Amino acid sequence: MNDETGLPICSAKGCRGAAVWVLAWNNPKLHTPERRKTWLACDEHREHLSQFLGVRGFLKDVVTLAAWESSAADR
């Protein structure tokens, strides 16, 4: 999600903080193993969102937004 200036913001409910992290995940009941959905997180919500996905077995990777964008540019 982006704010009104087009900058990515945290996916946590009600948060308007700048996104710093990408949480890559998938639901194995719905998605193929290689598919990755993403949530964005600010520093404050990274751990909470990671735990939420982790206890469900959905979390696959947590990387900085800069690293995620860099790897996407390489594809």
Image (cartoon, rainbow, N blue to C red):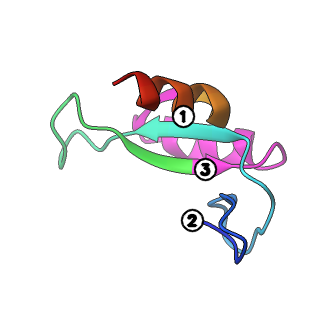
Q: Position of residue 6 (x, y in %)?
A: 65, 67
> Residue at image x 69%, y 60%?
7
Q: Which mark is residue 40?
A: 3
| CA–CA distance in space, label 1 to label 2 | 15 Å
Q: What amino acid is labelled 3 in the image?
A: Leu
Q: Nearer the viewer, mark 1 or mark 2?
A: 1
| CA–CA distance in space, label 2 to label 3 | 8 Å
Q: What amino acid is labelled 2 in the image?
A: Met
**SS at mark 3 in the image:** strand
Q: Which residues are magenta?
A: 40-61
Establish if 45 lies above or below 62: below
**SS at mark 2 in the image:** loop
- Pointers 1 and 3 in contact (C-beta within 8 Å): no
The 10 Å Cα crowd at callout 1, few under 14, some 14 to 19, many 20 or more, is few
> Residue at image x 72%, y 42%?
46
Q: Which quadrant would the C terminus be assigned to in this image?
A: top left
Residue with the mark numbered 2: 1
Q: Earlier in the sequence, mark 2 or mark 3?
A: 2
> Residue at image x 82%, y 42%?
43
Name the side, left or right, on which 1 lies relative to 66.
Answer: left
The quarter of the picture where residue 2 lies is: bottom right
Residue with the mark numbered 1: 69
Look at the image and say whether residue 49 sits in the magenta stretch: yes
